């Protein structure tokens, strides 16, 4: 603002981060919408949303005085306006241009507070983009020009101003009387009556339009940023009231809006019902608008009660009865039913958000971790007192803590799809630059994951997606020769598994060329010459540091850095990576990640004096096993017989060299991992325990089978077992030769 | 008649304050010289929004008689779209 007081300036500084994050969402939305529009170019709603997003960025940037964003976005908005008016078709070329512009908008927003980030090169780039935008914008205004650019149904400029003498609606259309008095803040909020008028023009035919300027003060007294305008419009349109109101949705707060149309008696009733506050009962609704009398309703209702018996077991629908017995018009009943439906939906689905700073939430979660530990401590002490009332009070409190924990951790959960949709652009651009065709599909984007995980997983995923595009999918000609469709298929999916989320990247490309991988592993000295490990091990070689098979190093992947980082990043999130390569048919990369980094439901067990926590979700059952039950088979591994099956068993005592005298009886906890079920032999079972995960120090990073530590109520430290990697240890024993080879060569 | 006031290429909310101040200064200078009809030219206007039109409209509520000369296509189109077509015609023909 031009004459911002100090208070304003403070406010703006404080609100800036919120603006940046909101504008970030808008630019992301713009990108998504542009990509969706490429698939359905005629979707008017998408185009409108796109325009609104650009408009919102511009408007809010204006409030913050970010003139560079405003100026640049303005050109984008102008072009979009032309598209919306049907003067310009959104061709792939324009789409690409807009995507590039969007990148610049995003950059300008991100660097809003850093002048130095904007280099002369970028300025030139933007100037160039603006020129390109203007070329399109200006060509659109002259549909008579003999240009080949597709100009969809140009609307004659004069059409909007036509003042036909007899205001009557054509059949099927309604003549709406719209009068709007705009609030003073309209301009400052980035909105404009003119663009609303233009928008309405798109909804139908404007029969007459008058702008009232009486309220505009003389120039001397005019505050040019305050809006004094109002207009009255007669719009002939097939649009519904909501659609017309939608045009005003951005100014609704301070706009006096009156939309009327000549209605029949029936339409009036329907309207009255729509305008009613949410009344839950159909009958009440109809009575209060006068569609049916109270006495008639009572009569119908008592009939309904009587007609209920045996025949169908179901009550006759009140709506049907009212139509039949009370002569209420079907359209009116339908409106009331719709209203009911809407009330139900809106109470459940109304999306209301509160923006909370992430570090505040983190502080709460940290405190909660302490609370969980303290709660467990109090519980322990209460048990020692053997005071039943105290124990019960503690149990109740712990129950509540658990609920708070679940609720609080839920606050951090966001749908993983937000990250996924970012990849559409990457796939589009990457495939384009590689000359490949790709059908990119996203499945299960609604699966939720901890926000910090979502952020941290984005980069590794990006790498894997690029890798699939670059190395996995073949160029069209090669695909056709291999009997596949010219366009490759790349699917990114997410789904929940017990206590974890599975993210899968699947392509139908050439898969991993094991021979070439093996050859290179030999050449690079990653594996001893001549040693042939198992297929799985060979596949996983692509994640080793300094490994790359791409013959031609592209600027996307193939430098041999990255894939090892991908693996490290995923493991740092306590996740794991699995490859399933089908040579010639495709590659599937599975990433399993724990749902949250902070607190899990654990199952506490003891071996000697050491305590271990197993994620409760992975525990299948616990079996009693006397010392002799766990046998050693001929391969030297521990096994136990469970209902006729032989189950491999991990003996924690020997694995981690825990000092203990083997007790008479031990228990075997059966857990499920991605490699199947196996048992973990323990000595003491201590039951369910809320576990706050603390990372292990650097010294213990290499410890296999342990994913973290936790502090128990008693102050003792328990180690958290990683069921997945313990499972690998068990199954690795099965192919002991390959396992050994691999550990030997890995530095 | 002396020179006409040239409205800027962009008559929108971002330039509104500037344009108003420039107009006020110009009008003050002109009226000091004579009380003739003020000429305001819209020939260069390429972009205009509601606030720009409102700024023009406010001239009609000022004491000095004025007229609009050479309104550009963009300006004419915006006026008609906002329902100011008749008003524009009046201002342009004001003799």
Image (tube, rainbow, N blue to C red):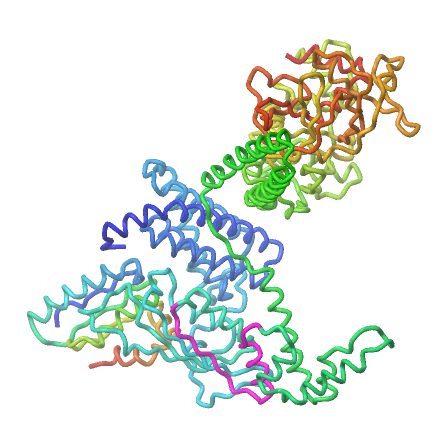
Measured from the top left, where is residue A239 in percent x and y?
A: 55, 75
The quadrant in which residue B7 appears is bottom left
Which region of the structure is painted magenta? A254-278
- Image: A663 above or below A164: above
Q: Quadrant of residue A635?
A: top right
Please check the rendered image and state whether residue A172 is part of the magenta-colored stretch, yes or no. Answer: no
**As displayed, is residue A18 above or below residue A154?**
above
Q: Is residue A597 in sight in this rendering?
A: no
Q: Position of residue A260 (x, y in %)?
A: 48, 82
* A276 inside magenta stretch: yes
Residue at the spot 78% in from the left edge and 78% down from the top edge? A316
Left or right, B74 with respect to B29, comes to right
Q: In which quadrant of the rendered image does the C terminus of chain A lie?
A: top right
Q: A715 or B17: nearer the eye?
A: A715
Quarter-wise, where is residue A306 in the image? Answer: bottom right
Please tell me which residue is depicted at 73% across the width and 18% down the height of the picture.
Answer: A652
Q: Position of residue A188 (x, y in %)?
A: 33, 61
Q: Position of residue A527 (x, y in %)?
A: 71, 12
* Residue occupying image coordinates x 50% and y 64%: A84
Q: Is residue B19 left or right of residue A596?
A: left
User: Compared to A105, does A90 lie above or below?
Assistant: below
């Amino acid at each position: 603002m031009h004459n911002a007081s100090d208070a304003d300036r403070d406010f703006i500084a404080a609100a800036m981060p919120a603006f940046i994050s909101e504008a970030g969402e808008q630019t992301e939305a713009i990108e998504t919408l542009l990509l969706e529009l490429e698939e359905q170019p005629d979707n008017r709603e998408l185009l409108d949303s796109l325009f609104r997003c650009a408009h919102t960025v511009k408007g809010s940037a204006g409030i913050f005085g970010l003139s560079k964003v405003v100026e640049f976005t303005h050109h984008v908005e102008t072009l979009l306006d032309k598209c919306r008016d049907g003067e310009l078709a959104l061709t792939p070329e324009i789409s690409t241009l807009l995507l590039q512009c969007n990148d610049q908008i995003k950059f300008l927003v991100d660097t809003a507070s850093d002048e130095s980030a904007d280099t002369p090169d970028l300025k030139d780039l933007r100037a160039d983009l603006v020129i390109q935008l203007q070329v399109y914008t200006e060509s659109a205004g002259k549909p008579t020009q003999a240009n080949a650019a597709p100009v969809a149904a140009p609307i004659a400029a004069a059409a909007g101003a036509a003042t036909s003498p007899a205001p009557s609606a054509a059949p099927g259309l309604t003549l709406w009387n719209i009068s709007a008095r705009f609030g003073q803040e309209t301009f400052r909020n980035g909105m404009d009556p003119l663009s609303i008028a233009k928008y309405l023009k798109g909804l139908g035919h404007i029969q007459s339009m008058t702008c009232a300027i009486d309220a505009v003060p003389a120039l001397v007294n005019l505050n040019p940023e305050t809006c004094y305008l109002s207009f009255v419009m007669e719009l002939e349109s097939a649009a519904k009231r909501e659609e017309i109101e939608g045009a005003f949705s951005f100014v609704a707060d301070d706009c006096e809006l009156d939309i009327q149309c000549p209605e029949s008696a029936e339409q009036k009733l329907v309207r009255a019902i729509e305008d009613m506050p949410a009344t839950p009962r159909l009958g009440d609704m109809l009575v209060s608008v006068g569609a049916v009398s109270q006495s008639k309703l009572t009569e119908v209702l008592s009939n309904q009660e009587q007609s209920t018996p045996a025949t169908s077991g179901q009550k006759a629908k009140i709506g049907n009865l009212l139509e039949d017995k009370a002569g209420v018009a079907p359209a009116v009943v339908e409106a009331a039913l719709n209203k009911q439906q809407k009330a139900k939906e809106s109470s459940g689905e109304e999306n209301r958000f509160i923006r909370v700073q992430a570090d505040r939430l983190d502080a709460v979660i940290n405190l909660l971790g302490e609370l969980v530990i303290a709660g467990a401590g109090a519980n322990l002490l209460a048990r020692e007192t053997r005071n039943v009332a105290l124990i019960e009070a503690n149990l109740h409190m712990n129950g509540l803590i658990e609920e708070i924990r679940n609720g609080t951790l839920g606050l951090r959960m966001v749908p993983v799809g937000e990250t996924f949709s970012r990849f559409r652009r990457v796939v589009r651009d990457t495939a384009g630059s590689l000359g490949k065709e790709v059908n990119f599909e996203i499945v299960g984007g609604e699966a939720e994951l901890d926000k910090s995980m979502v952020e941290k997983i984005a980069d590794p995923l990006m790498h894997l997606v690029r890798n699939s595009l670059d190395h996995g999918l073949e160029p069209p000609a090669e695909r056709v020769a291999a009997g596949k469709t010219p366009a490759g298929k790349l699917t990114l999916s997410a789904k929940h598994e017990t206590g974890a989320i599975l993210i899968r990247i699947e392509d139908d490309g050439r898969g991993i060329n094991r021979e070439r991988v093996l050859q290179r592993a030999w050449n690079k000295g990653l594996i001893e010459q001549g040693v042939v490990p198992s297929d799985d091990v060979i596949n996983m070689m692509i994640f080793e540091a300094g490994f790359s098979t791409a013959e031609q190093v592209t600027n996307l992947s193939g430098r041999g850095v990255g894939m090892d980082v991908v693996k490290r990043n995923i493991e740092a999130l306590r996740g794991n990576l699995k490859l399933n390569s089908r040579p010639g048919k495709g590659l599937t990369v599975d990433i399993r990640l724990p749902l949250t980094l902070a607190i899990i439901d654990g199952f506490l067990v003891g071996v000697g004096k050491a305590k271990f926590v197993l994620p409760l979700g992975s525990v299948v059952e616990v079996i009693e096993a006397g010392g002799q039950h766990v046998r050693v088979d001929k391969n030297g591994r521990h096994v136990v017989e469970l209902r006729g099956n032989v189950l491999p068993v991990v003996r924690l005592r020997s694995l981690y060299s825990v000092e203990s005298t083997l007790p008479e009886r031990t228990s075997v906890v059966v857990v499920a991992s991605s490699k199947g079920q196996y048992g973990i032999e323990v000595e003491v079972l201590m039951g369910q325990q809320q576990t706050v995960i603390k990372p292990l120090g650097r010294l213990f990073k290499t410890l296999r089978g342990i994913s973290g530590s936790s502090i128990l109520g008693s102050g003792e430290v328990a180690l958290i077992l990683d069921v997945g990697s313990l499972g690998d240890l068990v199954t690795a024993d099965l192919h002991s030769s390959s396992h050994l080879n691999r550990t030997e060569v890995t530095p | 008649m002396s020179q006409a006031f040239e409205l800027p290429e962009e008559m929108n909310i971002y330039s509104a304050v500037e344009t108003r101040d420039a107009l006020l200064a110009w009008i003050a200078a002109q009226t000091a010289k004579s009380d003739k009809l003020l000429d305001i030219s819209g020939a260069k206007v390429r972009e205009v929004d509601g606030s720009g039109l409102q700024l023009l409209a406010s001239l009609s509520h000022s004491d000095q008689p004025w007229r609009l000369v050479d309104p550009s296509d963009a300006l004419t189109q915006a006026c008609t779209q906002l329902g100011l077509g008749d008003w524009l015609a009046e201002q342009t023909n004001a003799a």
